[in-house]
């Protein structure tokens, strides 16, 4: 039990937990900050502790390794794409969703995730694989499937367009063009994807 | 002029060139071998020289840096996908092409290229970007466009399916699934891509 001399009695657990979660958040923020400045290779537990104005032991007490710390830092910073509003047509729904996915990709959490993946070795990549699947890939697939199902009900999507791979086309083209295009994905790129690939692929 | 004591006269240039190109090939093969064993990070000019049974100076004389050496090693080892025979239908042509692209991806040169991209830093990746565009991306796009144009002439592809992005769908899905699927791309994956994405996208 931790004692605070000025109070002279045991600290209430709720106060300790609040202080704990504030420190935890400061450490995670410092880890993200390190990722954006010195990258995965340059990030050290010492550097993170210094950035969070705490000791190395406070970091290691919560996270046994750089990998687990970075995975948690990414987990809290990755934005939720949220539900897609019904805008009345497949084209508008898909475009709205693709724009949100693009924004998530260029958010601080999204950029940190990509820098980690570009830099880390195969072993560390394996550790982040599950995070990417559960926080990026699967939510994206689910949202696209929601939009497709709504289009089937509305009548502007063919009834047999339910294969899983259909939900991979937009994220796959985004990853491919981000990797090979040498520039940020623009709204025009997404309009092209919707008008020349998704709408012809899905229309009845 | 190099002299061979046993001949006692100047060596004919043609003999020197042949010896030069044989040595060059041995150095490039040793570089590929190093990539497959110790990876991009572990590859050194010394290690390559040892593997090719030559001196470090012989390597540096031809390639001023690890980057230029590896770029040339990849260039000579990447397989050509070649022309796609007319198999009589869009589906068969696309499947034949996708299978060849998959084989190129898992060839020694393709695997070496991917390991380099996974490991090297952003600066080195920039140096390989041009190589990838000219030897992998653009030839693949051209072959898909050839298949689409043939389909338009044959009548099993709609006449307006000529947007550049249409040629990116198969390679984008291959890259996405190779990156996130955690396993090799199978023939069944490619059949799914053709039957659930490309044929519905392209049919009249």
Image: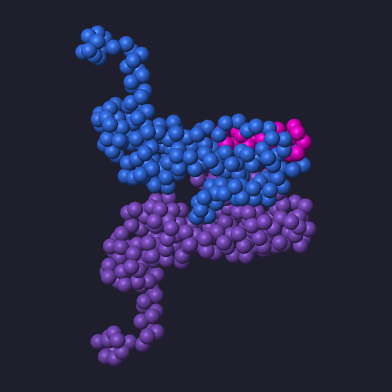
Chain colours: A purple, B blue
Q: Which residues are magenta?
A: B138-157
Q: Nearer the viewer, residue A196 or A107?
A: A196
For the point 53% across and 58% down, the residue is A104
Q: Is residue A81 visible?
A: no
Judge whether residue B182 is colored magenta.
Answer: no
Q: Is residue A155 left or right of residue B184?
A: right
User: Which residue is more in the foreground, B28 or A59?
Assistant: B28
Q: Quadrant of residue A139?
A: bottom right
**Relative image position of residue B9 (x, y in whole percent):** 24, 8
Q: Nearer the viewer, residue B41 or A58?
A: B41
Left or right of A182, for residue A162: right
Residue drawn at 32 percent across, 34 percent down = B65
Q: Main secondary structure of the magenta part?
A: helix
Residue A70 visible somewhere in the drawing:
yes
Q: Considering the image in quadrants, where does the N terminus of chain B appear?
A: top left
Where is residue A140? Give x, y as percent: 58, 59
């Amino acid at each position: 039990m931790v004692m605070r001399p000025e109070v002279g009695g045991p600290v209430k657990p709720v106060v300790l937990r609040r202080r704990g979660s504030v420190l935890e958040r400061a450490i995670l923020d410092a880890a993200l900050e390190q990722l954006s400045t010195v990258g995965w290779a340059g990030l050290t537990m010492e550097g993170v502790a210094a950035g969070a104005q705490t000791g190395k032991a406070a970091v290691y007490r919560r996270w046994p390794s750089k990998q687990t710390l970075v995975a948690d830092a990414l987990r809290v910073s990755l934005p939720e794409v949220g539900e897609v509003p019904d805008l009345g047509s497949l084209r508008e729904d898909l475009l709205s969703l693709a724009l949100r996915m693009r924004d998530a990709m260029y958010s601080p959490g999204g950029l940190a995730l990509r820098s980690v993946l570009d830099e880390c070795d195969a072993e560390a990549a394996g550790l982040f694989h599950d995070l990417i699947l559960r926080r990026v890939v699967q939510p994206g697939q689910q949202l696209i499937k929601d939009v497709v199902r709504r289009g089937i009900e509305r009548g502007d999507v063919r009834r047999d367009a339910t294969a899983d791979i259909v939900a991979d086309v937009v994220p796959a083209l985004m990853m491919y063009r981000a990797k090979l295009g040498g520039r940020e994905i623009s709204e025009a790129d997404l309009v092209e994807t919707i008008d020349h690939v998704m709408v012809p692929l899905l229309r009845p």
